Amino acid sequence: MTDAGFRHLSYQWSGGTEWMLVHEAKYDPQIIIIPPLFEELNLLRGFTVDFARALAARGIASWLPDLPGTGESLRELRDIGWEDWRGALHAAGEAVASHTGAAPFVASFRGGVLLSDAVEARGWWSFAPATGASLLRHLQRIQHISNIENDLEDHDNKRESSYFGGYELSLPMRDALRSAIVPPVNGPSRIVPAGSGTPLWRRAEPGRDPELSDLLAEDIAAWTASCAGR
Amino acid sequence: MGLNDSEDVEATLRAVLRDVLGIDQTRVVAFTEATPLFGSLPELDSMAVAGLLTELEDRLGIIIDDDEVDGEMLESFGSLLRFARTKALQ
């Protein structure tokens, strides 16, 4: 399969410029993909791009923005707050709408679901949402084990930022993550739960699951079609 | 999930090692109590251990406190198995 359909476009938010991986922008409908957060972002990167390809195979365009402090972003993650992520996603959604003339649908994964209501969208589809508390707990566990490995003490609350699973987060960011829950949205929504078996985000190495990415693309294709028919 | 004997716990631990770390079934079956894990098994870095423990929590229906996680517990297949049995069968 050719990847000629992929290109990068920038979008502006109040804190700077970030990039989006855009696949077949000429198609309709448009889907903005909010990826998983932190280490799950890396573990599911290939899976997420496979999902974008599977959408294109169904004539659906996708936009995968970098969150500030991740991917190609020039910002340091330790300087980024939860509201920055929300503001950036809101701006990314507006950029899609201005490129295409229509608001996108949102497809969000895992921790990305926690930010999904920041996008003004025609509908919100999500896969295997995680609470912020469970994501933070897992990051703290990774950090704790890494500290054992390196003979270090666990983190010191008095500092302004600290490492969680290898990610340096400000303490307000940590607190916002801890209290983040799946948000209510004002419009059509669908939540697809994780299937059986060991999920990709629990495995030690990044993995792909072409069958699952294809199944999910089929699910959202049918769902956006049913939304459009309303 | 109805885990009520130590053989069930052992089978679950081997399955989790296989599924999370992507270790070949024949290699996992050959693990003995003395097989060293953390620090010896290249697949088992801090992220992998965290995934392993979280998956064990789900499959055994237990909660593992980070205070309970130390080098000794992760040292060998036997030490991790003893920990899992104590948690799951208590």
Image (spheres, rainbow, N blue to C red):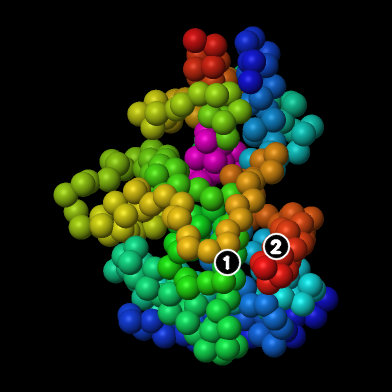
Residue placed under numbered mark 2 in the picture: A223
Q: How many marks?
A: 2
Residue placed under numbered mark 1 in the picture: A123
Which amino acid lies under the numbered mark 1 shown in the image of this protein? Gly
Q: The numbered mark 1 sits on a residue in which chain?
A: A
Relative image position of residue A221 (x, y in whole percent): 73, 66
Relative image position of residue B16 (x, y in whole percent): 65, 33
Relative image position of residue A131 (x, y in whole percent): 45, 47
Q: Quadrant of the C terminus of chain A?
A: bottom right
| Mark 1 surroundings within 10 Å by alpha-carbon count, few (fewer than 14), some (14 through 19), many (20 or more) | many
Q: Residue at x 63, y 20 (%)?
A: B1
Compared with B31, A29 (above or below) is: below
What's the magenta region? B41-54
Q: Can residue A90 be seen in this view?
A: yes
Per the model, the C-alpha gap separating discs 1 and 2 is: 9 Å
Q: Which residue is drawn at 55% across and 24% down?
A: B61
Secondary element at image label 1: strand
Q: Do the residues labelled 1 and 2 touch (CB within 8 Å)?
A: yes
- Circle nearer the N terminus (1, 2): 1
Q: Residue at x 64, y 9 (%)?
A: B5
